[in-house]
Image (tube, grey):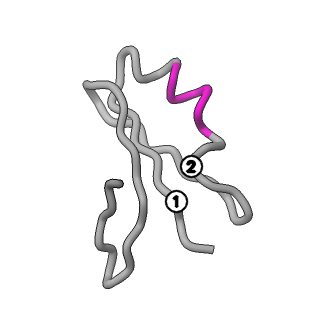
Amino acid sequence: MPYIDATGVKLYFEEAGEGHPIIFLHELGSDSREWETQVRYFSRAYRCITFNARG
């Protein structure tokens, strides 16, 4: 599983597609799965990045 170290905290992230990046953020009480439909569409032309933010 891909993780990034953000000031000593490991955050899970996913990338899909290529091109200019779009970063999808979610609100408290959700996770990166919220963006599945949008990532599937936009990853055809863009590099889509989602991550699980800390609550």
Question: Given the image, on which type of amino acid does mark 2 rest?
Answer: Ser
Left/right of residue 33 with respect to residue 30 in the rendered view: left
Q: Is mark 1 on a helix, strand or loop?
A: loop
Circle nearer the N terminus (2, 1): 2
* x and y percentages locating residue 37 in the rendered image: 61, 26
Question: Quadrant where the C terminus lies?
Answer: bottom right
Q: In which quarter of the image is the N terminus?
A: bottom left
Q: What predominant SS class does the magenta segment belong to?
A: helix
Tell me the magenta residue range.
35-40
The residue drawn where x is 55% and y is 51% is: 25
Q: Is residue 45 left or right of residue 41?
A: left
Q: Mark 1 points at which residue?
A: 52
What residue is rendered at 40% in x and 45% in y? 14
Q: Are marks 2 and 1 in contact (CB under 8 Å)?
A: yes
Report how many numbered discs are placed on residues in the image.
2
| Left or right for 41, reference 8 | right
Q: Which residue has dot 2 on it?
A: 32
Q: Where is residue 2 in the image (x, y as percent from the top left)?
A: 32, 55
